[in-house]
Image (tube, helix red, strand yellow):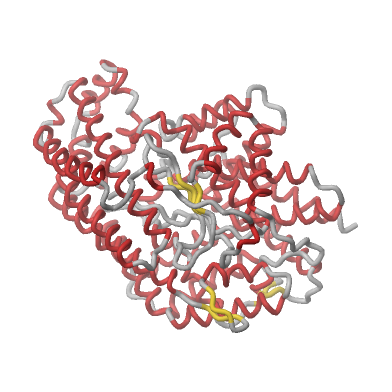
Amino acid sequence: MFQLPFPVRDANAASGSDQFGDLPEWDLTDLYASEDAPELKRDLEWLENECAAFAKDYEGKLADQDAAGLLNCVLRNEKINGIAGRIMSYAGLRYYQLTTDADRAKFMSDMQESITVFTTPLVFFTLEINRIDDAVLAAHFDANTDLARYKPVFDRIRAMKPYQLSDELEKFLHDLGVVGDAWERLFDETIAGLTFTIDGEELNIEGTLNFLTEQDRSKREAASRELARVFQDNIKIFARVHNTQAKEKEIIDRWREMPSAQMGRHLSNDVEPEVVEALRSAVVAAYPKLSHRYYDLKRKWLGLDRMQVWDRNAPLPMEDTRTVSWAEAEQTVMEAYTAFDPRMGKLTKPFFSKGWIDAGVKPGKAPGAFAHPTVTDVHPYVMLNYLGKPRDVMTLAHELGHGVHQVLAADQGEMLSSTPLTLAETASVFGEMLTFRKMLDKAETKEQRKILLAGKVEDMINTVVRQIAFYDFECKLHAARAEGELTPDDINALWMSVQAESLGECFDFMEGYETFWAYIPHFVHSPFYVYAYAFGDGLVNALYSVYAEGDEGFEDKYFDMLKAGGSKHHKELLAPFGLDASDPKFWDKGLSMISGFIDELEAMED
């Protein structure tokens, strides 16, 4: 299946305004001029014919290919992926600009269904690769260096070998994928279509979430209660989507004899289950010295006896509430990126000037933010819902990090450029850190430094603690669904079981907060995605420590890591920096950076 882009950050945003300056919009003509473009018709016809020809030429014959023949097969498959990816990128990006538009939704659905039909005959490709004898494949790699370059792709495909079904069942599951996509669309369209009323004003979900970072506590409370009311009114739909998606996954996993619900994600992330468990255990063990300690500190700053859920992302009382113009946001990120390395600034500039960013908040636009790589012969597109908050500047830095990573990895080609989710967050989180450090260096007063440090700690807690709590929720959800249908109350209870543990004793939870699982897109679009954020943050914290210590040649090694895309395992990528994610102490190194920031904040109280 060719996956669509989806919002990948739990961003706080609201309805658009001219106060931020001239916000850029996407120019999608680098993909196709329109849905009626002759080039699109040509590519669809080519794809249909080439998929059929590919199956005719290779089905039942892969094991008989010599090294040159197998390389030709891989290159043809790569071109098919490129054309299909271009079509679905165009359809998906148009849809996310206006998810409530029936014509855009239909066009995307039609493209997905066509491509699924065209590519069903190609299911044999990975199945037959897994039937090639290890010694034969090794000999092919020895005989042909161009083919050997694709060894990481073969390794990832063959990791699924123990869980492979019959050819007929694999084709059936491939065809059935459009049904799962329809449930994802139902979720997206439901979320985009929700309306919330605050002080007589009708808002979408982004506008309402934005109130959670308002200085006025009564507005934060009003937004939280309105979110709870609307989620409750739609809870049956959200529960049905989660029940269906989790059950579909359970059935497929059971047929494949997967050892756990998480195993499929670990395989696609090219990461060992024990490494993820070490990460999860390290973060949970650190809850008291991270989130619990920080939120108790914040409670004192806010002058509260108890924290409520609407205080979690509240600005500090002394915080400057001014909005940041788009021009200032661009300058801030460009300065930070260029100061690290001029090459970084040069790679980032076209995003601002060539229609590669869609920044404004508009009715019907998908919530959150993402960077979608499209295909390696075009360029990435970044989506934001920009509202001038300091955190929006960090989101811009984050997504541009993804964009730079995707541009640098493009030379690897379609099959090797894409990084596992665990590594995909590396450049984005590093970009955030560069931007934060640049802003911290410019702080003129102790108060400004305190505000910046607190904001960064909150972002890191949201990225590490919150995402691991999300991961635990998903683990519990999928385990419970395997035992039977879950009512909305069942899912609510699972959600609440991880909240107090992760946030700490100083929090009370309003009635209705138990439904807040409903709007998180990752649970529907990409189960168990969320631990990749914590993985990426921990990895980058360790990486930044190496950079801060003045590691010789760090910039060149960093660029080499990004250029590698998905061609290397995390162990190989981190080795030049003297780091190893399989070492349990690795995660403590990353978590200690967050703890150190909290230490500094506590010291400011003296």
Of 32 and 298, which appears nearest the observer? Answer: 32
With 176 as the anchor, is 314 left or right in this view?
right
Q: Where is residue 575 in the image (x, y as percent from the top left)?
A: 54, 28
- Please identify the quadrant where the C terminus is shown: bottom right
Q: Where is residue 67 in the image (x, y as percent from the top left)?
A: 21, 21
What's the residue at 59%, 29% (across, down)?
343
Q: Is residue 531 visible?
A: no
Q: Can residue 107 be seen in this view?
A: yes
Q: In this view, does 420 lie above or below 522?
A: above
Q: Position of residue 488 (x, y in %)?
A: 42, 79
Count the numbered circles shown. 0
Looking at the image, the residue that sits furthest to the top is: 143
Q: In this view, does 57 lie above or below 290?
A: above
Of 462 and 317, which appears nearest the observer? Answer: 317
Q: Where is residue 188 in the image (x, y as percent from the top left)?
A: 40, 66
Q: In this view, does 557 lie above or below 345?
A: above
Of 486 and 122, which appears nearest the observer? Answer: 122
What's the residue at 54%, 73% (across, down)?
496
Looking at the image, the residue that sits furthest to the right is: 606
What's the residue at 48%, 65% (across, down)?
520
